[in-house]
Each structure stands twice: as C-alpha cells, then as structure tokens.
Amino acid sequence: MSDMNNNERLEVTIPSNTRHLHAMRVLTCTLAESMGFDADASQKTALAVEEALTNVMEHAYHGEESHKMQVIYELERKKFTVRILHNGDQVDPNKLTNAEGLSDFHLQKKKGGLGILIMKRCMDEVSYKFDPPMNECCMIKYLPVAEPAKAKRK
Amino acid sequence: MPDLNISVRSNDTVSIVEPVGYLNAHTAKHFEDVLQKLVDENRILIVINCHGLDYIASAGLGVIMGFIDTVRESSGDIRLCAMNNTVKSIFEVLGFTELYSIFDNEEKAIRSFSETA
C-alpha cells in the first residue's frame, strides 16, 4: 500500500488500560509502514501514539481503567493523522512540562511530561482541542518528499 | 510472550539488569521494583543490558532517569549497553546519549566502572 491513491480512515476504541498500549503500538507502526514510512519513522510515530494514550490514561482518567479512548487514523497519500479522543479531564501539555530537552528535566528534577517531549520530537505536528465533554489530541506525520533522481553524467 | 522479563546478575561490584520485552507504562513498575531492590541493597554500580529490549517509552525512560540521579548522589551510576536501533533512536531523540554512558556491549560497560574508579 506504499502508493496510496485513496484516503482511508480507521477507528479503534480501547479501554483506558495500559495492557492495550502494546497492541496500539503495533497497529500504528503497521499502518505507518503501509503508507511508506521507513522503519525508524514508523516506530517513532507508534511511540508518539503510545505516549499520547498514556497521557490520557494518567492525566485525564487518573489511572481508572473503566473509561474509553477513541483512536482515529487518517491515511492520506503523504500525510498520516492520528486523533485521540477522550472524555476525561483536560490534558494541558503546558501544565505537564515546559521542558525543551532532557537536561531541563534533570534541572527540574521531574519525570512527568517526558511523553509530551517525545510526541513533539517524533511527530511533525501535535495539537490539542478542548471541546467538552470531548478532548482531542491530534498528531500528524508527513511522508518525506522523495528527492528527484540525479541525472547521469555522460 | 510475556510483556517484560527481567533478570539480574551480580559480580563483586557491578549488577547487570537484563530487561527482555518492552518497557512502557504497563511494565515500568516491574522495572522500577527491580532497580529499587538493587539500590536498597546498596548495589549502585548498575549496567542495564538492553539487548533483549524491544522498545522503551517515557515511563521506562523516567525510571532510568530517576534512578541515575539517585545512584549518582552516592557515587554510583547506571550505564547502558547493547541497544537495538529502535531503543537507540529514542535515546538519541531525547538527548539521552549525551547525558548517559552507553556502550556497545556488556563487557565494555562493566569495564568502564573500573576505568573511572
């Protein structure tokens, strides 16, 4: 499916239980690879999704496992969008961390917010929408533009 | 396949921790408990051999960060080795490679403690 002509949309609803994180990671990685992302980019996209889901479980649902999270994948020709929706408390990334790098975490002696940093570093765009009762985290990864083949010298 | 298996080996001075599987929010508590037990026993020269680690997420990285701070306060350290490309890539993305000691293999990681003693 590396040369996609049609947009595709997948929706998955999972309980807010950490045991499903690995399955979501595998699914995300598989979808990214099917779009033509290389292994490294696919793994990073999968990690960003896992971190976003973990944030929802920890900060929106406070570890309660009885809630639901909806994950929407939108596969376009050069653009992979992942939306994570939940109806828990608002997750304000600015309240979780203002660290820009790992050394900031050491200086601040804190671990919370590391996932936010991973999401920013692994995806091209990360945004949040708060529209009670639903909250959304939207992450986008673009397929790199292939460099044109160099003309052969005569 | 189990989510995460952890084995621990120790010689006179250095303890080697081998996590096999994946280290994320689901498994980080198990990993934390293993490291806490070592620190409680005052075993503060630790090598984490990552050869069986499929991937690591922030929950696992946070555990490592926290314990490195703890053991360094007592002149100990946690050193890492034998990462696959997936794990190494995440360490690089976050800048872990500049702050922590990472080696190609376990032998070099263990030897590094005697070289810096």
Image (tube, helix red, strand yellow):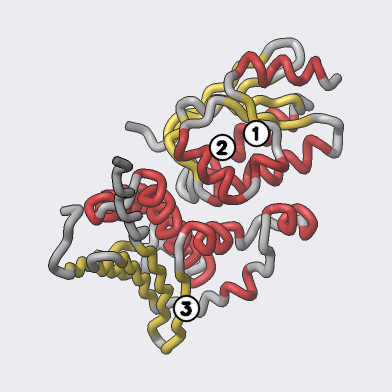
Q: Residue sitting at 65 percent across and 44 percent down?
A: B96
Residue beneath disc 1: B35
Tell me if label 1 and label 2 are in contact, CB under 8 Å.
yes
Q: Residue sitting at 78 percent across and 35 percent down?
A: B71
In the displayed orientation, state which residue is furthest to the front.
A154
Residue beneath disc 3: A128
Tell me if label 3 and label 1 are in contact, CB under 8 Å.
no
Whole-percent x, y for residue B3 in the image: 40, 37
Element type at mark 1: helix
Report the mark closest to the observer, 2 or 3: 3
Q: Which amino acid does label 3 sit on?
A: Tyr
Q: Can residue A23 be seen in this view?
A: no
**Dot 1: within a 10 Å radius of its alpha carbon, few (fewer than 14), some, or many (20 or more) residues?**
many
Q: Are marks 1 and 2 on the same chain?
A: yes
Q: In which quarter of the image is residue A123?
A: bottom left
| Chain under callout 1 | B
Residue beneath disc 2: B31
Which circle marks residue A101 in the picture? none
Q: The N terminus of chain B is located in which quarter?
A: top left
Q: Which amino acid does label 1 sit on?
A: Leu
**Dot 3: within a 10 Å radius of its alpha carbon, few (fewer than 14), some, or many (20 or more) residues?**
some
A127 is higher (above) or lower (below) than B33: below
Q: Quadrant of residue A114?
A: bottom right
B29 is higher (above) or lower (below) than A65: above
Q: Are marks 3 and 1 on the same chain?
A: no
